[in-house]
Image: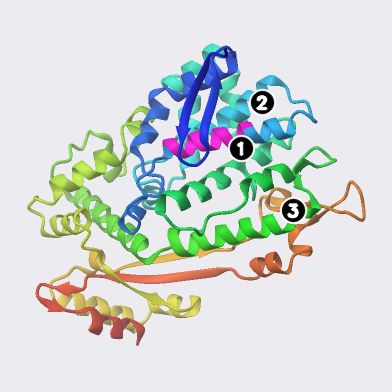
Amino acid sequence: MKNEKLLRDPVHDLIVFDRDLPEDRLLLAAMDTAEVQRLRRIKQLGMAHMAYQGAEHSRFSHSMGVLHLVRRMLDRLAHNEPVAPEWKLATQLAGLLHDLGHGPFSHVMEKFFREHHETWTERIILSPATQVNRVLTAYDPKLPAMVVDALHGRAEPLWLNSIISSQMDADRFDYLLRDSHMTGVKYGIFDLERLLMLLRIGSSGDRIVVARKGVLPVEKYLQSRYQMYRQVYFHKTVTAAEAMLMSVLSRARDMAADGPVPHVDPGTPLGKLLSKDEITVDEFLALDDSVLYHAMNLWSRCDDDVLRDLSDRLLNRRLFKSIEVQSDADGEDLLFSERLHAAQEFLEQRGLDYRYYLRFSRSSDTPYKPYGSRGGKAVIWLEDDMNPGEYVDVKDVSPTIRAFTESPYTIIRAFFPEKAGDESIRAELTQILLG
C-alpha cells in the first residue's frame, strides 16, 4: 500500500499526497510551515461573513484547493508535453504559496494600506528568515526563486504560466467553487470536470487552449464568475462592512498621526502600520484577522467616541446603510458636488464626523476582458476546427461571451448610519445625496 496522506476538502473531496515521493514530502513540509499555517487565520472573503454566515473559510483552505487543481491540470496536460521536474514542482508550490502575502481580512487591508499582496508573497518566499524559504532551499537552493518566477509568469515551458495566472487558472477555478459552496449560493457553480477534460496545450507551446466543443462550458464558467462578483463579492452588505472597517482603520491611523492609539503599542506591527512605518517580513507575518479583532474588541471600550462607536458597530453587526448611485457619471459628480457638501454638513450638525460616518465604495468588473497589459494571457483561446493548429478568441465564436466583453459595470455606493442618536437620518440623507 502507498504511504498516503489524505486531506478531506469540502469542494474537491480527497486531496492525496504520497509520502514516498520526495516532491509530495516537500509539499507537505511547506504546508506545515508557519507562513502557510498563518493563512488559517485569514478569512478568504474578508467581511463577507457579515452577509453570508457560512463564509468563514480561510485562505489556507483555498490555497490547498489551488494546489490540488494545479496538480490535476499538470496530470492532464504534462503527459503530452514533458516538463522538467523542477518546474513541475515550482508550479505546484506556486499554487500552494500564491496567497502568502495577504494581510488581515484579505483585500480590505490591501485597499487600505495600498500594497499588493503579491509584493509581500514574493518577499516571504525569498526571505531567508522564513520557514517556507528554508524548507524550499533545503530541497533545492534555486527553488524559492523558481517559485517566484512561476508566480510572475516566467515558468518554462510557457504554458505552465496559464495554470497559475490566466482567465481560466487554478486560482479562479477554486475560489469560484469554494466561495459559492461556503456562502451557500449557487451562482459560482460550473462544470469543472468538463473544462479540465477540454484543456489542451497550444501548438506553439506558450499557452493552454480549450477544445472547440468547449464553448458552452466556458460560457457557463464566465457566467458564474459574473454572478459571483455581482451577488457575493460586491454585495451591498459585504461592501458596507468593508467600508466600516476602512472607517475604523482610518480613525485609528488619524489618531496615530497625533499621538498613541488606544491599546496599541506603537512598536508592534499594527502600531507601525497605523503610523505608516516600514515593517519587516517577520512583522507582517504577525498580522492576521485575530490581531484586528482583538484591537477592535479593546477599541469598543476605549475613551475615543468615534473609534469606540465604529468598533462596537462593526463587531456587533450594526452596519451602515447603503444607497447605490446608478451610473459612473452620477457617482463622479456626487463626489465633487454640492450634494456631498450638504451631506457632510448634515452629519456634522448631528454630531457625526463625516470623515468616518460617510463612506463610498466603487466596485468595478468586466466579466471577460481579453485585452490589456497581460496580452495573450488574458484571452481564452479555442481550437479552430477549420484551421488545425490555429486558435480563436472565445468571444469571436460566442455571442454570449462577446456581450461580456462589452458589459463592464461599476457599482458606486454611499454608506452612512441609519440614525444619529435617536434621530432617524436615513431618508433625509438619502434624499440629499441623490438629489
Residue at 30% from the left image edge and 41% from the top image edge: 289
The amino acid type, in three-letter code, at marker 2 is Lys
The disc placed on residue 214 is 3
Q: Earlier in the sequence, mark 3 or mark 1?
A: 1
In the rendered image, which residue does mark 2 sit on?
Answer: 88
For residue 74, above or below residue 169: above
The span shown in magenta is 60-71
Crowd rating for badge 3 (residues with CA inside 10 Å; few <14, some 14–19, many 20+): some
Q: Which residue is mark 1?
A: 152
The CA distance from mark 1 to mark 2 is 15 Å
Residue depicted at x 61% and y 26%? 90
Mark 3: amino acid: Gly
Label 1–label 2 contact, CB within 8 A: no
Q: Amino acid at mark 1?
A: His
Is residue 269 located in the magenta-colored stretch of the structure?
no
Q: Position of residue 61 (x, y in %)?
A: 44, 37
